[in-house]
Amino acid sequence: MDWNDLLQMVLKVVITVALPIGLTALFKWLAIQKTKLEQGMEEETLFIIKEAVRIAVLAAEQSGLADLLGETYKDKKAFALAAAERFLNQYGITIDLDVLADLIEAAVMEQFNKNKEMRTAISP
């Protein structure tokens, strides 16, 4: 066994172990950020922000399905971020774009998990 094969095998093991741990930590951090944001806002403003994020995520997914956007994650995220920002601007709500991007990430993950649970419940 040469060094390349050994290195490749070690990297596969490290990635297999580290990826789920890293994703779990990321999603926990996103949930904490979402909770922090929610604690400091009025109920109506929070509702409008949640709606903006929900609509933006759905619009990005639909645009991706219709081949209006590229298939890449970055294209959909940029589309969702711009759509949410436009929606919020209509109500005079300004929010840090990094925070808005985190909320979009959380909404995508929430939707992904909901779809995963539905597929698991339906399968025999």
Image (spheres, grey):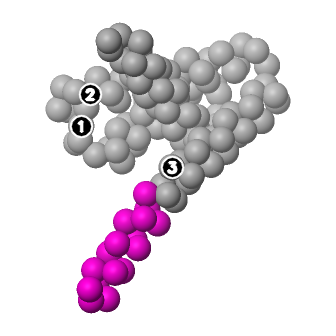
- 6 above or below 116? below
Q: Residues within 10 Å of mark 1 (few under 14, many from 20)?
A: some
Give me the disc on residue 69. 1
Q: Residue at x 31, y 89 (%)?
A: 3
Tag 2–tag 1 contact (CB < 8 Å): yes
Q: Which residues are magenta?
A: 1-16
Nearest the eye: 14 or 112: 14
Q: How many marks?
A: 3
Q: Nearer the viewer, mark 3 or mark 1?
A: 3
Precedes in sequence: disc 2 or disc 1: 2
Q: Residue at x 79, y 19 (%)?
A: 42
Q: Secondary structure at mark 2?
A: helix
Q: CA distance from mark 3 to mark 1?
A: 28 Å
Nearest the eye: 26 or 102: 26
Instruction: Characterize the magenta stretch by its predominant secondary structure.
Output: helix
- The residue labelled by disc 2 is 63
Q: CA distance from mark 2 to mark 1?
A: 6 Å
